[in-house]
Image: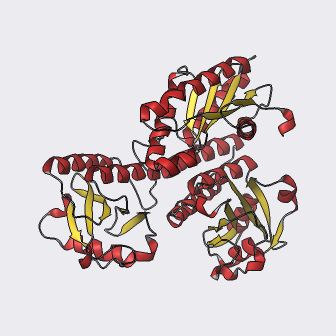
Amino acid sequence: MNKRQDKEKSAIRQLPSQIMDLMLDVVLEIMGAKKGSIMLLDDKHQELTIRSARGLKNEIIQKTRVAFGHGISGKVAASGQAVFLRGNSGSSQAGILADDLVKPDIHASCVLPIRFQGRTLGTVSVNFEASGDAPHDYRDREHLVQNVISHFLEYFFRVSSLDSPDENSQVFMRNIFREYGTLREMRVVLDYVFQLVSDILGSDKKGAMILRKQTSDSPDMVLGYGFETKEYGEFWEKLLLQHEDAEDGSEESIRILKNEKCLLPPEIFPPDGFIIIVPLTFQGTLRGEILLLTEKEPVFGEDTRRAISLLCNTVAGNIGRDARGQKLQDFTLTDNLTGTYNYGLWWQRLHEEFSRARRVKESRISLIVFDVDRLTRFNRIHNSFKGDQLLRHVADRIKKCLRPIDIVGRIGGDEFGVALIGANKADALMVGERITQAIAGIAHEMGVEFSITMSGGMAGFPEDTESPEKLVEMAKTALVSAKIRGGNCIKLFEKLEE
């Protein structure tokens, strides 16, 4: 191992805990989970130790040691292969046996190696309490997770040689915020566009979205909806070739193909079904395609075609990508689903306000982390698209209750962070209660039968902590207490909860 590799190995072991926690939070959000951990490899002792965790007891974090090549994480690190485990049957991948599964309360988990420049640095584990909690497109999400981890490490190593520690922190965090916002927003935007196009064309919400590399015609990313896309890579390649060989100028218009010509396996889609190809084209450049599968022959008029073309051209114009998918021009500052700050920019604004508050005597910041109660059940009853609608309504109600100087962002799947600048806890509690009351009428407005409520956890600067990271952690701890109490309330953080 050369000196540079030694330096990078040493640097990763010295990665600040708040950065490691942020990386884990990003991974968990992408995977749609609340529990997980990051383990790093100690070359000297050839063992992995937990460096960041969510949902694990402190004594477990401190005592856990996994030998390289043993246990689940040790075998994943040794093999360099990601594994998805369901139940207690083990996995032939990475040689994992049923005896390696030591936590019966975990019904499904995904364990990925942390690799950088061809070397294994550790593992990240994502745990689901129920098998049904695991996303059906977890393999696509693995790709995003690997990108996130690579970018975290890349930026960290890039700035670790700078002379000024303050500059290190600022540059590193700023780049992480930009990178995370991009990856997160890309998936949110594309998911929403897929659902919208499906609704307009009246097709089943099943298919794929393909993004193309700017440097070649080959696919850069394939996002699946309704089935695993990676298992049918040959099908997508053949379909794209058929699409490109067309000589009728149809690359810029919607096309309909019969499945019998595309040979999509019958267990996935019947031979007499239809495939709708919707191009994402901007200024004559094909940026990608939306592929919709439908069992009924689609019929739509010219007005529908024009509406779809306008929508997809707008989307394509805002997808500025390189091979890593690093840039979404208009989607990097706000969460496209809710219109609030995205996670990265919200963190950046919170840090800025803390820096300002520390310089001004008697400054206060109260933070409330809100969570929509029973959203999973709502999605199960009314479908996830209605769930997205609900989140947009909730965000609108929150924003109407705040002042221009306050900071609101979507910081989790159904979590909103609200930082009230200059407000003490008593004033903040009044605002929080006003917010919970404001969402009471959403169900009627949406035309659904469901009791829509929210829970909140509150902590304050400087009385509870002088650290923004700790403030968020305390607010989330109080949120858990509010949930335990039955939800539909706001709980203040208490020292006994630490």
Query: Which residue lies at the image location 45% right of the left edge and 31% below the top edge?
Result: 444
Left or right? Give the position of 154 relative to 95. Answer: left
Location of residue 173 with respect to 264 vertically, above or below: above
Seen from the viewer's position, the closer of residues 255 and 18 is: 255
The x, y position of residue 272, in whole percent, is 25, 74
Query: Which residue lies at the image location 59% right of the left edge and 32% below the top edge?
Result: 349
Seen from the viewer's position, the closer of residues 155 and 337 is: 337
- How many badges with numbers are in the image? 0
Query: Which residue lies at the image location 73% right of the left edge and 35% below the top edge?
Result: 471
The x, y position of residue 487, in whole percent, is 68, 36
The x, y position of residue 279, in whole percent, is 26, 58
Seen from the viewer's position, the closer of residues 436 and 392 is: 436
Location of residue 405 with respect to 286 vertically, above or below: above
The answer to which image quadrant residue 490 occupies is: top right
Q: Which part of the image, by quadrant, shows the C terminus?
A: top right
The x, y position of residue 415, in whole percent, is 60, 40
The answer to whether residue 124 shows anywhere in this view is: yes
Q: Which part of the image, by quadrant, shows the N terminus?
A: bottom right
Which residue is at the far front?
449
